[in-house]
Amino acid sequence: MRKFNKKKLPSRYTTVGPDRAPQRSFYYAMDLTEKDVAKPFVGVVSTWNEAAPCNINLMKQAQFVKQGVNASGGTPREFCTITVTDGIAMGHEGMKSSLISRDVIADSTELTVRGHCYDALVGLAGCDKSLPGLMMSMVRLNIPSVFIYGGSILPGRFEGKDVTVVDVFEGVGKYTSKKMTAHALRKLELKACPSAGACGGQFTANTMACVSEAIGLALPYSAGTPAPYKERHKYAINSGKAVMKLLEKNIRPRDIVTRKALENAATVVAATGGSTNAGLHLPAIANEIGIKFDLMDVAKIFKRTPYLADLKPGGKYVAKDMWEAGGVPMLLKTLYDGGYIHGDCMTVTGKTMKENLKNVKFNPKQKVMRSYKNPITPTGGVVGLRGNLAP
């Protein structure tokens, strides 16, 4: 069991010395012991709610993160923050709440951590704006932090094919144009979303989940495992253990999220045909630490990065397929081999990206991801335009 000098940690302001007896009394009221209070305090924040399947299992996963923290000499303190889920909010006035929620997530996490003087942070997010919101708070707070994605939904099956919620949206269009019956649309909507987890294609949630590994804030392979699989518990426990190692070594988010790390993140977005929302979220993360990295910087990386992962909505496969094929590390490996990824970036493993990828081998037999030598197209699926209408 590691030993930490509590007098050098932020939690000393609420737990150390005779004048903090009242605060310690509150902790004893929650069944903490004197030994628990003497350990580092680790915030475990999730964006759990019952708004959508993206978030519904995050509180359960948080319990396994807490196990990892406890096993490594820390005292976890769990809390939740809001989420606005685009899948429910879009198509009506509620859509105006979506992007604002990202900043509220970042702000509320910051306020909770600062207000209670936590020493480290593990964040679990499930959908859209909640992923960048927590990453923004991590780099803003700059205390040892680990991000973990809640996982994607399993694909549904309809008429012998894998389907996602996008097929339901398209089904509405087919129904409107009289290419699908109301009965068929009802059958599709009942089958499309069979489990907890975020939308299964390479939409914003899975895009930013890939970013979490590429930028170095999440453990390798943690982004890929589908939400309902028990294997996620392992990554949650290991994330709790990892944050304690970061605290011991004093490795902080701003040691990890550098200009090069942001370029790695944009490269993975391009290579997966990811969500254009990354053009909003990566500059927002960069802005938290004063790094100039704007939409056109993202676009330049898209222009030079090969499109390698054949994922919905532009391609054939879903997040579960990418995980089974080798996950984000295998994609990073071929991008690194092709010279598209910076290998000297620090990550939450305490090792560099190059070190993390040392034993990863690209599997040419799977069909989801291409080698950098054989891309689907030579550039990413999005271009950035400038001209007299958009100078």
Image: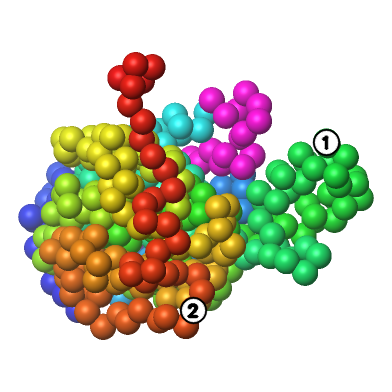
Determine whether 271 is above or below 277 in the image.
Answer: below
| Residue 358 image position (x, y, % from top left) | 22, 79
| Residue 209 image position (x, y, % from top left) | 41, 56
User: Residue 113 appears in which quarter of the rendering?
Assistant: top left
Front one among 69 and 389 = 389
| Residue 298 image position (x, y, % from top left) | 30, 42
Quadrant of the rendering where the C terminus is positioned? top left
Front one among 353 and 121 = 353
Front one among 85 and 36 = 85
Q: Residue at x 33, y 26 (%)?
A: 386
In the picture of the structure, the residue carrying the numbered disc 2 is: 366
Q: Is residue 88 magenta?
A: yes
Amino acid type indicated by mark 2: Gln
| Residue 376 image position (x, y, % from top left) | 45, 61
Q: Residue at x 33, y 69 (%)?
A: 373
Front one among 183 and 382 = 382
Q: Which residues are magenta?
A: 76-96
> Few, some or many C-alpha atoms within 10 Å of disc 1 (few <14, some 14-19, many ≥20)?
few
Quadrant of the rendering where the N terminus is positioned? bottom left
Amino acid type indicated by mark 1: Thr
Which badge, 1 or 2, comes first in the chain's sequence?
1
- SS at mark 1? helix
In the picture of the structure, the residue carrying the numbered disc 1 is: 176
> Few, some or many C-alpha atoms within 10 Å of disc 2 (few <14, some 14-19, many ≥20)?
few
- Is residue 77 in view from this perspective? no
Left or right of 272 on screen, residue 84: right
Q: Residue at x 23, y 61 (%)?
A: 341
Q: Looking at the image, how many numbered discs can be counted on the residues?
A: 2
Q: Residue at x 87, y 52 (%)?
A: 184
